[in-house]
Amino acid sequence: MIQPMLESVDICGVAFTVEPNTGGNYYVINYDDITGSTSSITSGNAQKDKLLYVFKGKEFIRDTFISKLCKCLKELEILFMQPNLDIEFAMVGNELFILQVRSLHVNEKIASFEEQKKYMNDIYLKIESGNKENPFLFGQKPVYGIMPDWNPAEIIGIRPFPLALSLYKEIITDNIWAYQRDNYGYRNLRSFPLLIDFYGLPYIDTRVSFNSFIPAKLSEKTSIRLVNYYLKKLEKDPYLQDKIEFDIAFTCYTPDILKRMECLKEEGFNDNEITEVVETLRDMTNTIIDNKEGLWRKDYRKIHTLEKRYEKFINSDLDNVSKIYWLLEDCKRYGTLPFAGLARAGFIAVQLLKSLVNLQVLSGKEYQDFMGELNTISSTMKRDKEEMTIDAFITKYGHLRPGTYDICSKRYDEGKEIYFDWNKSEKEGAGGFITEQKNNALFKLSLEQMKKLKELLKSHGMADDILEFFDFIKTAIEGREYAKFVFTKSLSEAIRLFGELGKEYNISIEDCAYADIKIISQLYASSMDPRDVLINSIHRGKEKYQITKSIILPPVICNADDIYCFHAMDTQPNYVTLKQATGEVYLIELKNQQRNLADKIVLIESADPGYDWIFSYCIAGFITKYGGANSHMAIRANELQIPAAIGVGEKLYEKIKQAKMVQLDACNRRVNILK
């Protein structure tokens, strides 16, 4: 067959008629509307390509190109009598050309369209029902995101197992988060859950979040304007969803606050309103950071209480259900609640420090010198690995696990050979940690700087004791890290005991991951049969998780219609399969191509077909800097069921290159650097 060569191509791309990882009923369209190349998508070389998801059966698409393509895709499904097609296409002007049609390998069973349509409609109605003004909330409507505030996508992933999701809700996002904000002088949002899950996909309700960052003493009129401004800003720039406290919301007072608030004037805020915001933030911030009576001091003491109570419960004769119940109750009261407070204080501390750089009181190097002197758990762990015996090190750090809430993620004491290299070398410590050669100069202020800072703090109505000021910053940042280390010990032990509970009834760890943690409260306060309760919860969890796996939603949802047709964000990697792999990082370069890649996580620049040779090895997974969801290598990964992250971008790619071992979690769409 001979075809004429297309010239002056406006758009080219690849479309799938089903989402190959999840089996969801979506048209997945990866296209290039910039270069005019007909091979940029399949070669994985496109750097400005777009990835569009369209749920099937929706006719509201206004874009002429997308509408025409979707109608064509539907016609091809009928013509070839199958729902799973891989199609290459091109647009020249308004004319659509189909270049190739192939059968697409699909990993998951293709979800029933009618059932999925029902689930999507349920999500649509949930968003629509919340898209109204609430008499006890400021802001016209909610905006949902996977990364704002307590950023669930980072902590538990976008498709967490039911146990992990229910744990996160239980110990943080249902109530604890709001108690902390109220205690620290922000608006009282108790009884408002922060996290909403759409059939298991966790999202932060940013309207609730933004309300919780409003000082309690701020007038209602100004509060309403402020929250609506935040929501409007996020809707306009959704890529800021993981930076709302830096680039959108004003959550604390800093000496450079007037400079940061210039954007409010552009939005029509008058001087009186800005002054009111500034003054309430200053009063609240001064109360929080007070070196003697600040709430962060009390929270720090609570963390030590948790350590003492932990040992009592662990050494008691209580049954597993009772231990889990009380470990989690204590974790909330003496763990995540004070941790949330110390995390707030730590954020304020960093903001204050950065403001001094912005105002040229400190240089960038002095900022780094100060941060380099902090004694956090990370730096302590590196030192302890050099000085402690293996047993002593594991006793102290063994409770940690890469997936803090995931029962399937091995703890350090369960996989010490996986996470650490116990052989010392000249450049490495016993755990494979690079021995740090700190060249930082000691942080110190000149007399001129101290005088300038004292005058600055005094002019801003803040306590001007320089030593206490820096003591707060140092202790708050270190305290945040220490509090997390301590509360995760109770959490990790509760998760371990949950696995032991399942084992008592011949239930595997993998099955326990589908249970809901709320059954522990049921079992503790009743005489119900634990085995029946566990099995029923797991059964329901598995059914729900099948729905969770089939649904794909945008990272930021501004309107209900967004769930049916949306572009993936530029910075979002394309994950292939729903699998997880852990392995050493292996960078593919000309000089090392022929070495054994077995069980390695392979790094390659682009998802080009020329790298097919890597599949002759039993690799654990692979990561590319560039490439789209529909590139050749993505299709190969699907066919061979090899987890992959395609097109992670330059920043993350360079970070992974420096790592020795990573966990590639395609299901939860994240890459965890282990060492």
Image (spheres, grey):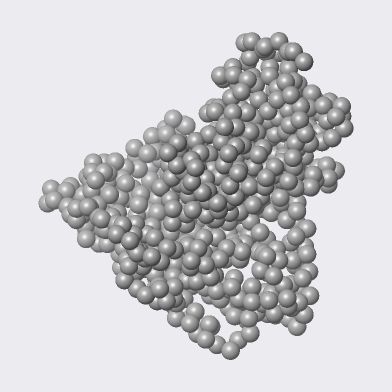
Residue in view at x 67 percent, y 37 percent: 635
Q: Is residue 280 left or right of residue 28?
A: left
Residue 175 x/y as whole percent:
58, 63
Q: Quadrant of the N terminus?
A: top right
* Count of marks, rendered view: 0
Q: Is residue 313 left or right of residue 470?
A: right
Can the viewer see residue 231? Answer: no
Residue 460 x/y as whole percent:
28, 48
Residue in view at x 33 percent, y 61 percent: 425
Q: Relative to 586, is 500 above or below?
A: below
Residue 566 x/y as whole percent:
66, 34
Residue 542 x/y as whole percent:
75, 60
Residue 102: quarter of image: top right
Can the viewer see residue 351? Answer: yes
Residue in view at x 48 percent, y 46 percent: 595
Q: Is residue 172 left or right of residue 127?
A: left
Residue in view at x 44 percent, y 67 percent: 485
